Amino acid sequence: MSECLFCSIIARTEDAEIVHEDADTLAFLDIRPLFPGHTLVVPKEHLQTITDLPATLIQPFFCSVQKLAMAIETAMDAHGTFVAMNNKVSQSVAHLHAHVVPRRPKDGLRGFFWPRSRYDDDRARTAAGDKIRAALDAL
């Protein structure tokens, strides 16, 4: 896809600091990192979201994410990593990608990037669980 920035990086027609490549995935530094070492892992095949990822690519994709999480923690002298993925909402490039971000205590990144709240009561929590279980059964 010529209009996809990440496809252009994969094709080497757009510049990026590539840190890992294998048959199915590519990993490169984010140009607007939360912290130095913030890396994006993408499948080489143009897929928009996690729901588009075929079963045959789940293992290779997440093995690359896992490998990058280990390497980034070591390379950036971090205490851990934050691994995240947006699907459609807040997805600045419509190509599946996982963010692997080095983390340290008191680095300024606070939990998730949106407000969190509790369920109104146990009944509301159970109702949400029932809806998800029904949707899974329908798949």
Image: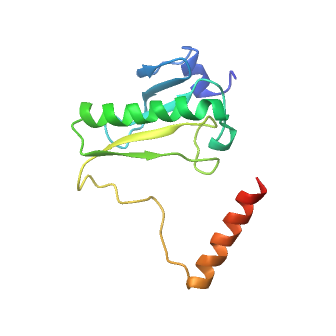
Quarter placement of the N terminus: top right
Q: Position of residue 17 (x, y in %)?
A: 41, 21
Lateral position of residue 63 relative to residue 127, left or right: left
Q: Position of residue 76 (x, y in %)?
A: 25, 34
Q: Give the image quarter of residue 105.
A: bottom left
Q: Position of residue 2 (x, y in %)?
A: 68, 21
Q: Position of residue 120 (x, y in %)?
A: 56, 84
Residue appearing at x 26%, y 52% in the figure: 107
- Who is closer to the viewer here, 9 or 66? 66
Does 26 sit above or below residue 101?
above
Residue appearing at x 39%, y 39% in the figure: 33
Residue appearing at x 50%, y 77% in the figure: 118
Lateral position of residue 4 relative to residue 112, left or right: right
> Furthest-top residue in view?
12
Lateral position of residue 73 relative to residue 68, left or right: left
> Furthest-front residue in view?
137
- Who is closer to the viewer here, 71 or 135? 135
Residue appearing at x 43%, y 45% in the figure: 83
Does 36 sit above or below residue 131?
above
